[in-house]
């Protein structure tokens, strides 16, 4: 058998490459188009009634959450309070292990009322980052803490990986700082509060690790986490205390986003941009100075 001619091999390879690139992009374009439709549908139809946000027959319907059981030795947990809380209440396997990406999408939607587009986009991104298939593969919660895949430094509720590689541990002093930062009515959190907190954490991360910098996608994740506190949790101090300190749902809690189609990426982006663009430290030189201080260059001017 003679080898196939170079031109044939090359053409095939180019085609396969192009198709897989377009395939990946097409999926995203499709998701954004559907998201836009859901965004418009939400504007057009009335919200779910208070007390009826979690669909009937699902855990948390009518504010009745399954019993909270703290994680046991050997259970898998991660840097994300939202996923840990679901495992602690048995909505995800309490072990935190062998979760199908596909199934995660469905339960996250029912529990937090994120739009289906959102609930596909994030686990699909995570599956890709872990080199697994969204459609067929599973993961343990701790898997998402692979450093600088999804997990990143400068978290509001976790110490940086350099200080403790176990990102499932709740950093109570950091959580307390978040809970004290609210400047809204009843001490509730506002977008400006979250910008301030994120800026502070980024400066601290820079001081601890001179090479610290966040990739665009990690900035976006970071301000997305923060924005979840403002949207799904409505910034409410009372609820966030239980949720962040114990990774438990408060009695009778339900998502504050009541749209029929859930929180779309389109709507969410509004809050994310407000929070991210409000981070003063990114532009006023504070972050830069924090890096220099680490190398003992910061005092030069004062000499
Ligand atoms: C996924 O695969 C890429 C390319 O082969 C590799 O660089 C990366 O480290 C892998 N990621 C994980 C989490 O295994
Ligand atoms: C956002 O969530 C990821 C994954 O749980 C975490 O690693 C990251 O530190 C969080 N970022 C912030 C700013 O809280
Ligand atoms: C320090 O920061 C860099 C850039 O953000 C990051 O890649 C690296 O993992 C960090 N080092 C540690 C030990 O966390
Ligand atoms: C939301 O913002 C992210 C980051 O800027 C972007 O990748 C995504 O396309 C935006 N989504 C929508 C629906 O606008």
Image (spheres, grey):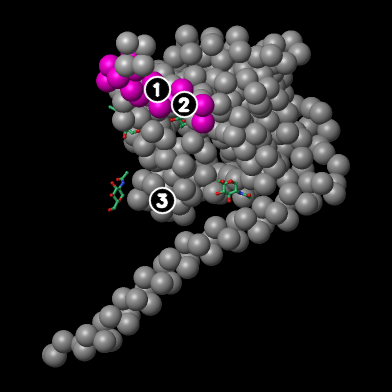
User: Residue 183 magenta-drawn?
Assistant: no
User: Contact (CB < 8 A) between labels 1 and 3?
Assistant: no
Query: What is the residue that sits farthest to the left in this orientation?
Result: 1
User: According to the image, label 2 marks what residue?
Assistant: 285
Residue 3 location (% of width, % of height) = 16, 87
Q: Quadrant of residue 150?
A: top left
> Alpha carbon of mark 1 to alpha carbon of mark 2: how far?
6 Å
Q: Nearer the viewer, residue 281 or 37?
A: 281
Q: Quadrant of the N terminus?
A: bottom left
Residue at position x 32%, y 11% from top? 303
User: Contact (CB < 8 A) between labels 1 and 2?
Assistant: yes
- The numbered dot on residue 289 is 1
Is 208 located above or below residue 38 in the figure? above
Residue at position x 49%, y 19% from top? 200
> Alpha carbon of mark 3 to alpha carbon of mark 2: how far?
35 Å
Residue 104 location (% of width, % of height) = 52, 41
> Alpha carbon of mark 1 to alpha carbon of mark 3: how far?
36 Å
Q: Label 2: how many residues lie within 10 Å, few (<14), some (14-19) or many (20+)? A: few
Residue 63 location (% of width, % of height) = 72, 24
């Amino acid at each position: 058998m003679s080898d196939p001619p170079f031109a044939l091999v090359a053409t095939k390879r180019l085609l396969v490459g192009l198709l897989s690139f377009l395939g990946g992009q097409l999926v995203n374009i499709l998701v954004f188009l559907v998201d836009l439709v859901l965004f418009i549908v939400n504007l057009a139809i009335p919200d779910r009634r208070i007390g009826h946000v979690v669909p009937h027959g699902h855990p948390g319907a009518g504010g009745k959450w399954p019993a909270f059981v703290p994680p046991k030795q050997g259970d898998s947990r991660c840097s994300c309070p939202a996923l840990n809380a679901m495992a602690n209440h048995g909505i995800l396997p309490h072990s935190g292990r062998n979760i199908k990406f596909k199934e995660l999408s469905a339960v996250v939607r029912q529990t937090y009322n994120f739009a289906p587009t959102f609930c596909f986009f994030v686990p699909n991104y995570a599956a890709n980052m872990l080199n697994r298939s969204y459609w067929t593969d599973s993961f343990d919660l701790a898997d998402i803490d692979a450093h600088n895949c999804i997990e990143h430094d400068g978290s509001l509720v976790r110490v940086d990986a350099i200080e403790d590689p176990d990102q499932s541990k709740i950093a109570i002093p950091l959580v307390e700082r978040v809970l004290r930062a609210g400047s809204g009515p009843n001490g509730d959190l506002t977008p400006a509060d979250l910008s301030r907190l994120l800026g502070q954490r980024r400066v601290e991360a820079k001081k601890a690790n001179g090479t610290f910098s966040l990739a665009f996608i990690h900035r976006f994740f970071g301000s997305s986490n923060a924005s979840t506190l403002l949207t799904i949790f409505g910034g409410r101090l009372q609820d966030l205390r239980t949720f962040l300190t114990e990774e438990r749902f408060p009695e009778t809690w339900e998502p504050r986003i009541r749209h029929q189609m859930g929180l779309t990426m389109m709507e969410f982006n509004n809050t994310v941009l407000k929070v991210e663009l409000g981070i003063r430290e990114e532009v006023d030189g504070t972050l830069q100075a924090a890096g220099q201080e680490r190398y003992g260059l910061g005092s030069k001017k004062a000499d």
